[in-house]
Every structure is written in structure tokens, then in C-alpha cells.
């Protein structure tokens, strides 16, 4: 043991690595999750097991897993950062991310579970011509997952950079490798259980941070809000009332459409969850629609509490931290993504910092695994099996093998993009963009598929294309895209334009093309399946 | 499952009990969805177009904007709970419907 520590110390001298308590806490957690992965790899036989955890997850477990999946880098790191730096406007993310679950609960969760198999594209392909629809759905899933994944990798890079002292790029690569081990060897079951553990730890961390923040105000909420209304970053900035809206999206000369941008963001957030492939796919891991319903409600409760807590460690950070505590990116802008861990360090010392960083890192690791899972599942199941090979696979394990190979490439691409973008972008903002794309491309076709008899293949494809292209193009034309100084599109979030366009594209594509008697005939079947659960894929292990 | 053949989807779809189930669902889901989307979008609209009003403090230093945001959480939880309650009735209707066809 002493020899090992001596070697570690020597290595520390040589490489500049810091084998701090944080690092060991980290490693312990990572090792734990690898063990779970190994055990689940032994259990995961066959496509149902790999892709959908054998459909044996219980309602509250799935609720925790969905919550864990949801409380990604964006929620924990991004929101606390954007609230700390921009006040009330950042809190909109908390509100939007939560209310979005009503969209899921009322419109999407149960019909999807009743009708689908592994992916959203299964629902779409029920009545429509499978090949074009699956191809487009697969592409859309890949795009949304990529945006989301870059956000996670950026967060991970920042944490590991500060935590261990290795630079950003190798940090991102390390995360990618670990993630690949999860996905390639464990599939959905591993990521589900990792999410559950992580959700519990995250809530624990959020509560601890909030209590410590309130502790600074003698547990008086009144004093807390008094301080927030005159937040001065522990004296390093002029006091500003963080409770007031407008710091990020207020109408100013430089930003004349700020309030429209805010509305656009809000719209994307509330509609996006119902179109997120990696969240939707979690509904296939439960035995039936009723359990799916229960899991959404659990997730809503857990996530809601978490987001209320962002009030404390988000706003509170601005009253406790100094501006100099917050690290800067290469361009000199404060990196909000690191606010939560640094707050932990200031309030609770190195061990608390270690704990929060480990939890945040686990957050990111598991979400990245889940994202890769859904993107690679989509490609293997929707594109490879159904589009290229017309629904027939040569051997039993082939689809699973293709998924694993896809996971590798998806991981590699996202690592590359995250490194190229650098650590400066706020994770919540990136995820907000992913939500806008999901709401524009995926949600219209999901809803029309479930509820509209006349909906046909042309409509589905045009809806996906118009939604995807309009949202991506508008993002590229915005301040965050190609031309940062003179953006053509004045809003940072495309939602208010691209979401209606997505619906319009799906609608016009349908009514302007010939009715599809096949699609309409199958509507009865899909409708009955979706509403009653008759014929739904049951749990594969006799539950 | 009691039969080996595919269910007669058309027959079930036209069954009055199925139509009643759909109607019951719509009676909750449509107004509830319109309500929550309106209540939710009212937040960015009010905050964006009437910021000075929303900045007015209401309780101590806490302003309308924050309270309105907090109320969104309450709304979400209440609506979710209401949905679960009403969905239990739908489950009963659904079971009766499926039993009618031997499932």
C-alpha cells in the first residue's frame, strides 16, 4: 500500500497529475460503475436484453433512471452556471425542463410504449413506408444526440481538467473511452442502473449544496433572497438583482429581439423532451404502459425537486463566490459550467468538491453512454436492419454487433467535436438547442403518427426534413453559428420559427400528396394498440 | 392471450367501448394540455413584454417573476397527480374492453 502511494507521488511529480482525494473518490465511483457494467454484460443476451434492459425495470426505478438521464451536465453544471452568471433568465431552463414532462406524460409516454419496439422510428414506421421514414428518423436521432453529447463532453472536459490537472483534450478522450466500455459491453441495462445510482447521488449532492448555501444565511429564506437581490459576487462586482429577468434575454439595443428569443427558448424546452430519442427509448425498458406512466410521474417529482433546489445553489453561488473563483475559458469569458463544483469547494472544502465533481462526472458519463446507446441503437435497428437489409438479419447477434460498432464511431465523432469546440460553451445552452431540434423534427411526426389518420409517408419525411433543416440552418445563421459578429438570424434559439415549420412541413407534406390507403388502414391498428396496449411487447423475462 | 390469430383491429376500433375510452381520454388531455401550455408560455411572454411589472417585489425581495416561475412547478406536480388519478379510471375501462374481446 505504501509502495503504491509512493509510486503515485512519484508519478505525480513527473507528469503533473494531481492524485488528490477527488481523484480517488472519482476512481472509486468509476470502478463501481464498471463492476455493474460487467455484471450486466453477463446478463445481457439478445437484442431485447441489450437494447431494452429486458423490459424488466420497475416504475420507480425507471423514474429514477429517467430523472438521472435528464439531470445531465446541462441541468447540474449548466443551469447553476447560467443562473449564477445571468440570474432569473437562467432559471427559465429549470422551469422549461420540468414542465416539458407534462407534454411527455399527456401525449407521448403511454402510446409510445404500447406501440413501439426499441426506437421512436418503430412508431413512425408502423403505418408508413418504413425505409424513408426510418432513414430520416435515424438521421434526426443522430443529430439531436450529437448536440446533446457535445454539451456533456464539454462539461466533462472542464471538470476533469480542474480535478486532475490533465488538459481538456485528453480529459474528453478519457471520458469517451469509459463511455464506450459501458455501452459496448453492457448495453441499456448498465446505463439504466448507472443512471439510478447517479440520480440518487445527484439529489444528495443538490440537497447538500442547497443546505450549505442556506446555512450561510442562518437558514433564513428571507435573508437568502435579500442577498440574491443584491448579489455582488462576494464583493467583486457591483450589486445586481439576480431575481430580475433580462440579464441574458432582456431587450437592449444590442439585442432588440431578446424577449422573442426568450419565448423561442421556452417553446423549445417544453416541447423538446417529448422528441428526445434517448429519453423516449427509456420507456421501452418497462413492462407496460402503466409502468411507463408511473415512471414519468416519479421522474417529474424527482426532477422538480432538483430544479427547485437550483434556486439555492444557482442564485446562491453568485452571493458566495467571487468572480475570481470562476475559471475563464480561452477567450476570457467565465466558464459557468464549473460554478457548482467550485461552490462545493468554497463551502465544504476539498472533500465536498471531490464528491460533487465525482457526481457530476458520473452524471456526464452515464448520459453520454445513454446517448450513444440511443444513437447506435437507432442506426443498427432503423438503418442497418430495416433500411439496408429489409428487416432481415443474417445472424442473431448481428444487430447487436452493428450497434456496438456504431457506438464506437459515434463516440469518436463526438469526442472530436467536443475538443474542437473547446470548454467555453455553456452546457445548458447547447442542450437547449438540442431540444429545439427535437421539438422541430421529431415531435410533429410523433404526434401526427399517433393521432392523425390521414398522416402519410410523404408527410412524415417532409416533417422530419423541414424540422431538422430549419432548426439546424437557423442555429448556423445565429450568433452561435458561422457569423458571430453579424448573425443573419437574430435569435439564439430557433424554436419559435422551426417548431411551427416542422408541424407545417408534416401537415403540408401530407395534404399535398396522395392519401395513403395503407397508412390509413393501419391507423385503426396503431390507434387501438396505442390506446389499449393490446399486442404490446411484454417483458422478456417472465415478470 | 386467448387466441392465436391477430386481433381484429377494425372491430375493436369501431367498438362503442373503445370510442368511449378515447373520448374519456380526450376530455382530460385536450383541455389539460391547452391549459398547461398557455400557463407556461405566459411566463416568457409576461416577463419578456412586461418586465417592469414582473420585477415588482411581492414578498420581501421576491418578485412576481420568481413566484410565477415557482408556480409552474406546483402546476406541473398537480397536473401530473390529476392525470394519474384519472388514468386509473381509463385502465378499468380498458380492461373491460379487452376482456370483451377475450384478452
Image: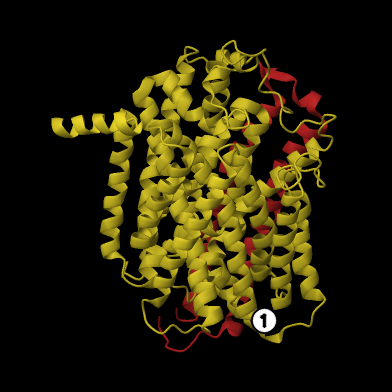
Q: Position of residue A401 (x, y in %)?
A: 39, 71
Quadrant the N terminus of chain B occupies? bottom left
Q: Residue furthest front?
A: A14
Q: Residues within 10 Å of mark 1 (few under 14, many from 20)?
A: many
Say which element carries label 1.
Answer: helix
Horizontally, is A300 left or right of A523 in the view? left
User: Does B56 appear above or below A147?
Assistant: above
Viewer-closest of A179 and A484: A484
Viewer-closest of A73 and A484: A484
Q: Please name the residue shown 74% across and 64% down the image.
A: A466
Q: Residue furthest bottom?
A: B5
Q: Please name the residue shown 27% across and 57% down the image.
A: A38
Viewer-closest of B52 and A428: A428
Q: Position of residue A275 (x, y in %)?
A: 61, 58
User: Does A507 appear above or below A101?
Assistant: below
Q: Is residue B97 visible?
A: no
Q: Please name the residue shown 49% across and 78% down the image.
A: A385
* Image chain in yellow: A
Residue A257, picture quadrant: top right
Q: Which residue is mark 1?
A: A519
Amino acid at each position: 500500500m505504501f509502495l503504491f502511494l509512493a509510486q503515485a507521488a512519484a508519478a505525480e511529480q513527473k507528469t503533473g497529475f494531481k492524485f488528490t482525494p477527488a481523484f480517488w473518490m472519482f476512481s472509486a465511483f468509476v470502478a463501481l460503475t464498471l463492476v455493474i457494467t460487467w455484471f450486466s454484460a453477463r446478463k445481457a443476451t439478445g437484442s431485447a436484453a441489450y437494447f431494452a434492459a429486458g423490459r424488466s425495470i420497475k416504475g420507480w426505478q425507471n423514474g429514477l433512471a429517467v430523472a438521472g438521464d435528464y439531470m445531465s451536465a446541462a441541468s447540474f453544471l449548466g443551469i447553476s452556471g447560467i443562473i449564477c452568471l445571468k440570474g432569473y433568465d437562467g432559471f427559465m431552463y429549470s422551469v422549461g425542463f420540468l414542465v416539458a414532462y407534462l407534454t411527455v406524460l399527456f401525449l407521448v409516454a403511454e402510446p409510445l410504449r404500447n406501440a413501439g419496439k426499441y426506437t421512436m422510428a418503430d412508431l413512425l414506421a408502423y403505418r408508413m413506408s418504413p425505409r424513408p421514414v426510418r432513414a430520416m428518423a435515424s438521421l434526426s436521432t443522430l443529430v439531436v444526440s450529437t448536440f446533446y453529447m457535445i454539451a456533456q463532453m464539454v462539461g466533462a472536459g472542464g471538470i476533469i481538467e480542474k480535478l486532475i490537472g490533465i488538459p481538456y483534450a485528453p480529459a474528453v478522450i478519457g471520458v469517451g473511452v469509459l463511455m464506450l466500455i459501458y455501452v459496448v459491453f453492457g448495453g441499456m441495462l448498465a446505463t439504466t442502473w448507472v443512471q439510478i445510482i447517479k440520480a440518487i447521488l445527484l439529489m444528495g449532492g443538490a440537497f447538500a449544496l442547497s443546505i450549505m448555501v442556506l446555512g450561510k444565511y442562518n437558514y433564513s429564506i428571507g435573508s437568502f433572497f435579500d442577498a440574491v437581490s443584491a448579489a455582488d459576487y462576494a464583493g467583486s462586482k457591483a450589486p445586481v438583482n439576480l431575481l430580475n429577468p433580462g440579464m441574458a434575454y432582456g431587450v437592449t439595443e444590442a439585442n432588440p429581439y431578446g424577449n422573442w428569443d426568450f419565448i423561442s427558448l421556452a417553446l423549445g424546452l417544453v416541447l423538446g423532451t417529448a422528441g428526445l430519442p434517448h429519453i423516449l427509448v427509456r420507456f421501452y425498458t418497462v413492462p407496460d404502459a402503466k409502468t411507463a406512466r408511473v415512471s414519468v410521474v416519479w421522474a417529474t417529482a424527482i426532477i422538480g425537486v432538483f430544479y427547485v433546489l437550483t434556486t439555492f445553489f444557482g442564485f446562491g453561488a453568485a452571493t458566495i463566490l467571487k468572480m475570481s473563483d470562476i475559471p475563464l475559458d480561452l477567450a476570457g469569458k467565465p466558464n459557468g459550467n464549473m460554478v457548482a463544483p467550485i461552490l462545493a469547494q468554497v463551502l465544504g472544502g476539498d472533500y465536498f468538491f471531490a464528491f460533487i465533481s465525482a457526481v457530476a462526472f458520473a452524471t456526464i458519463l452515464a448520459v453520454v453512454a445513454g446517448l450513444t446507446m440511443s444513437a447506435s441503437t437507432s442506426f443498427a435497428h432503423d438503418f442497418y436492419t430495416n433500411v439496408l437489409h429489409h428487416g432481415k438479419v443474417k445472424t442473431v447477434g448481428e444487430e447487436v454487433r452493428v450497434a456496438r460498432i456504431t457506438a464506437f464511431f459515434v463516440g469518436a465523432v463526438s469526442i472530436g467535436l467536443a475538443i474542437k469546440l473547446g470548454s467555453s460553451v455553456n452546457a445548458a445552452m447547447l442542450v437547449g438547442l438540442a431540444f429545439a431540434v427535437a421539438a422541430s423534427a421529431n415531435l410533429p411526426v410523433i404526434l401526427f403518427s399517433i393521432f392523425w389518420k390521414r398522416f402519410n409517408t410523404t408527410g412524415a419525411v417532409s416533417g422530419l426534413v423541414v424540422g431538422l433543416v430549419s432548426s439546424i440552418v437557423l442555429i448556423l445563421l445565429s450568433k452561435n453559428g458561422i457569423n458571430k459578429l453579424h448573425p443573419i438570424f437574430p435569435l439564439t434559439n430557433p424554436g419559435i420559427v422551426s417548431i411551427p415549420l416542422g408541424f407545417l412541413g408534416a401537415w403540408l407534406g401530407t395534404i399535398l400528396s396522395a392519401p395513403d390507403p395503407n397508412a390509413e388502414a393501419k391507423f385503426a391498428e396503431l390507434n387501438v394498440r396505442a390506446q389499449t396496449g393490446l399486442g404490446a411487447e411484454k417483458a422478456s423475462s417472465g415478470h | 392471450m386467448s387466441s392465436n390469430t391477430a386481433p381484429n383491429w377494425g372491430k375493436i376500433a369501431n367498438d362503442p367501448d373503445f370510442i368511449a375510452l378515447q373520448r374519456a381520454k380526450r376530455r382530460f388531455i385536450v383541455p389539460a394540455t391547452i391549459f398547461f401550455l398557455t400557463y407556461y408560455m405566459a411566463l416568457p411572454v409576461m416577463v419578456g413584454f412586461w418586465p417592469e411589472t414582473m420585477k415588482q417585489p411581492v414578498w420581501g425581495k421576491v418578485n412576481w417573476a420568481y413566484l410565477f416561475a415557482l408556480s409552474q412547478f406546483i402546476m406541473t406536480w398537480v397536473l401530473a397527480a390529476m392525470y394519474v388519478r384519472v388514468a386509473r379510471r381509463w385502465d378499468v375501462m380498458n380492461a373491460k374492453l379487452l376482456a370483451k374481446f377475450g384478452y
